[in-house]
């Protein structure tokens, strides 16, 4: 089509073919105008800026062809142009030219200029609002109001809006240039026709003016009427706001929605008919029509209210709620007091939602798991400055922050009385701290304090709680998502192991067992391969976890001996034998059964050994054999859940092990 339009500029056209193309041009412009009336939002007609260029080029090419015929054929350029010229001129050339100029002025100064300005402003405001819209989408995503797919669609729509209005800003220049070109081509046709007719065709001046003015006006109208339609379409699409209905429906619903407006308008016209000299019949006719329309609208609304009486006061209706929604429990939810709402409101400068996005990304990078969306809810039963961190509907930890203050963490070398503030403790780690005003932040930093804003305090606390309870958060559906992601990269591994050697539920138990002891599950491919190797021989989850931990020795070594050295407390062989003999094998898995007196003695021995090492200021782990590791970990958790227990097979041979204690009965 584009190549054909360009060919029209070069190749002379037959008058009959030109008539056909002019009719196609008018039809195309009419279709574009009607389309802009019926779309519900501008993006539904996203090709409009490109169509502006194509239609403008098409009209200009037809103008060139018609000019060629007018100047070469003595003013004869087809029946369409001749008919339009005769209809407007009607024997008076001056009137015809004036009418044509008025149409051009209306298009150029009113419609085209206005459309250009609207497009320019819309483009600027759309681009300026993009960052805010993107942040609002991220906030809704983090709050759980939308899912990842909906967020992606909304981001794409925002980008498309910016592209559309940016393109419209430039495309409106085509319409402006087309109007200018129409005036110039008309002058060329008229002046050129007069010169050619007077010099080469031996016509008198009056005949030349009649012939060429007729052709010029007809040609101008044939090109300007489609241009006027498309200019109007440009204005409509530029001023179109998003809605659930087409423009004609909106106008009918909004302009003729108030019966009293029609009553006042009709009454005013009837009163105006009393003024002497005005056409009374027409004023009374139009005024009466408005009164009748107003009365019919009033009757229709009254009937609607009588048929649906419960809709008279909709504000008194109780909101309907699906009872199934009450059964839903959020994996992670944060309840906050009302004074903390500004921390999650981006309009008030709150950045807590943005911090939660960073935390989710950090967990994905460090632990290899996707944290579910953290939902924030206000709770009037809490103190205004209090918040509660909930895991699966149960409150795990609480905290309190002062929004207009900063938390200054007390360093060991500083004097507690050297800084004014409200005494408190860090909600995440329980360290001594003070809430200080903003003007004291610089002084606190100079004194060696670590200054943290309220959002960072809450985010750190949430991160700590989620990490501690990550094994509770990871469900089978989450594991399935991890499997689907792994399948895209290693489909053979997933198809061979998952569902054949081990189930999704078994993999979830192994992963939660690793997370419970803060072992990352990033190397999911390694974990699945290990389960594929050993899952055929045993279904004992504890034993499978030990096999997986051994396959992750590089990761475990990096956690506990990143500098190549490791201080450990070893376990006496006699104690290991007691624990080993106490392991009972059942169909439901293995468990530890030891005499209560011996168990009490074991707990006492572990406690004493740990206490001695802690007094020395050494951070250590308990090192034992693989077969009893997990059971000693269960015993150690009764003393302190922070005690780490690893086996010999989980540490690389290059690590230098320093024994600083021993556990024995």
Image: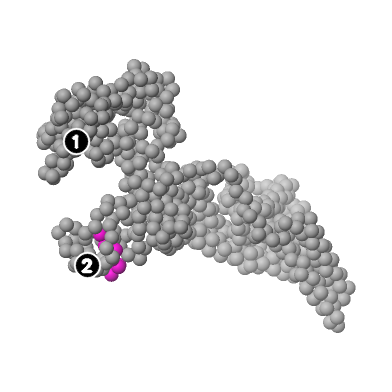
**Is residue 619 at all visible to an observer of this figure?**
yes
State which region is magenta.
433-439
Q: Nearer the viewer, mark 2 or mark 1?
A: 1
Q: What residue would you read off at disc 1?
A: 604
Label 1: few (<14), some or many (≥20) within 10 Å?
some
Q: Quadrant of residue 553?
A: top left
| Mark 1 residue element | helix
Q: Residue furthest right?
A: 281
Query: Looking at the image, which residue is at 41% across and 62% down?
Result: 384
Separation (CA) of disc 2 from disc 1: 43 Å
Label 2: few (<14), some or many (≥20) within 10 Å?
some
Q: Is residue 137 above or below residue 108?
A: above
Q: Residue furthest front?
A: 597
| Mark 2 residue element | loop
Viewer-closest of 71 and 299: 299
Viewer-closest of 535 and 14: 535
Query: Looking at the image, which residue is at 75% across and 70% down?
Result: 261
> Where residue 341 sits: x, y (%)?
43, 60
Viewer-closest of 82 and 596: 596
Query: Looking at the image, which residue is at 39% across and 61% down?
Result: 385
Q: Could you tell whether 81 is left or right of 185 in the image? A: right
> Where residue 480 sits: x, y (%)?
44, 32
Query: Looking at the image, which residue is at 15% across and 27% down?
Result: 572
**Is residue 152 at all visible to an observer of this figure?**
no
Q: Is residue 224 above or below residue 20?
A: below
Q: What residue would you read off at disc 2?
A: 419
Q: Quadrant of residue 639?
A: top left
Q: Identify the image quadrant of the N terminus.
A: top right
> Where residue 312 sits: x, y (%)?
72, 60
> Where residue 605 sits: x, y (%)?
17, 34
Q: Identify the image quadrant of the C terminus.
A: top left
């Amino acid at each position: 089509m584009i190549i054909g339009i360009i060919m029209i500029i070069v190749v002379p056209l037959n008058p009959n073919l030109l008539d056909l193309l002019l009719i196609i041009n008018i039809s195309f412009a009419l279709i574009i105008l009607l389309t802009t009336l019926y779309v519900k939002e501008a993006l539904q007609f996203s090709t409009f800026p490109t169509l502006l260029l194509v239609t403008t080029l098409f009209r200009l090419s037809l103008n060139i062809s018609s000019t060629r015929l007018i100047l070469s054929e003595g003013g004869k350029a087809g029946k369409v142009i001749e008919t339009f010229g005769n209809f407007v001129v009607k024997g008076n050339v001056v009137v015809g030219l004036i009418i044509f100029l008025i149409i051009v002025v209306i298009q150029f100064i009113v419609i085209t200029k206005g459309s250009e300005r609207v497009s320019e402003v819309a483009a600027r405001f759309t681009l300026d609002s993009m960052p805010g819209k993107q942040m609002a989408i991220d906030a809704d995503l983090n709050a759980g109001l939308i899912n990842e797919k909906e967020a992606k669609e909304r981001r794409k729509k925002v980008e498309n809006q910016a592209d559309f209005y940016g393109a419209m800003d430039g495309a409106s220049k085509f319409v402006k240039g087309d109007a200018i070109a129409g005036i110039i081509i008309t002058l060329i046709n008229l002046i050129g026709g007069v010169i050619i007719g007077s010099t080469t065709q031996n016509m008198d001046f009056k005949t030349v003016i009649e012939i060429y003015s007729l052709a010029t006006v007809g040609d101008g109208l044939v090109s300007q009427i489609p241009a006027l339609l498309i200019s109007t379409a440009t204005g409509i699409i530029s001023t179109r706001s998003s809605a659930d209905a087409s423009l004609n429906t909106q106008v009918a619903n909004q302009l003729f929605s108030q019966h009293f407006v029609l009553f006042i308008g009709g009454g005013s016209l009837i009163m105006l008919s009393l003024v002497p000299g005005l056409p009374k019949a027409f004023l009374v006719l139009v005024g009466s029509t408005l009164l009748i329309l107003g009365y019919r609208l009033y009757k229709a609304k009254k009937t609607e209210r009588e048929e649906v009486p419960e809709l008279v006061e909709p504000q008194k209706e109780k909101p309907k709620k699906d009872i199934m929604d009450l059964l839903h429990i959020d994996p992670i939810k944060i309840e906050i007091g009302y004074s903390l709402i500004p921390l999650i409101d981006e309009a008030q400068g709150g950045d807590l939602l943005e911090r939660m996005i960073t935390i989710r990304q950090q967990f994905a990078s460090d632990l290899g798991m996707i944290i579910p969306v953290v939902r924030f809810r206000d709770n009037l039963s809490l103190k205004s400055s209090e918040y509660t961190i909930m895991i699966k509907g149960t409150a795990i930890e609480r905290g309190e922050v002062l929004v207009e203050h900063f938390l200054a963490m007390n360093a060991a070398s500083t004097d507690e009385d050297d800084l004014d503030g409200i005494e408190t403790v860090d909600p995440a780690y329980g360290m001594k701290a003070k809430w200080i005003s903003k003007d004291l932040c610089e002084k606190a930093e100079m004194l060696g304090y670590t200054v943290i804003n309220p959002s960072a305090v809450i985010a750190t606390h949430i991160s700590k709680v989620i990490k501690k309870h990550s094994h509770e958060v990871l469900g089978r559906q989450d594991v399935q998502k991890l499997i689907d992601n792994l399948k895209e990269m290693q489909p053979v591994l997933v198809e061979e192991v998952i569902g054949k050697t081990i189930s999704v539920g078994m993999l979830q138990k192994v992963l939660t067992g690793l997370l419970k002891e803060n072992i990352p599950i990033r190397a999911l491919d390694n974990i699945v391969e290990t389960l594929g190797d050993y899952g055929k021989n045993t279904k004992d989850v504890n034993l499978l976890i030990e096999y997986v931990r051994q396959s992750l020795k590089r990761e475990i070594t990096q956690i506990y001996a990143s500098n190549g050295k490791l201080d450990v407390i070893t376990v006496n062989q006699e104690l290991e034998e007691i624990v080993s003999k106490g392991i009972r094998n059942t169909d439901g898995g293995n468990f530890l059964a030891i005499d209560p007196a011996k168990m009490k003695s074991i707990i006492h021995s572990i406690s004493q050994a740990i206490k001695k090492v802690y007094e020395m200021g050494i951070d250590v782990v308990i090192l034992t054999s693989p077969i009893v590791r997990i059971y000693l970990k269960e015993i150690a958790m009764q003393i302190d859940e922070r005690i780490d227990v690893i086996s010999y097979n989980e540490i690389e041979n290059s690590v230098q092990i320093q024994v600083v204690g021993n556990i024995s009965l």
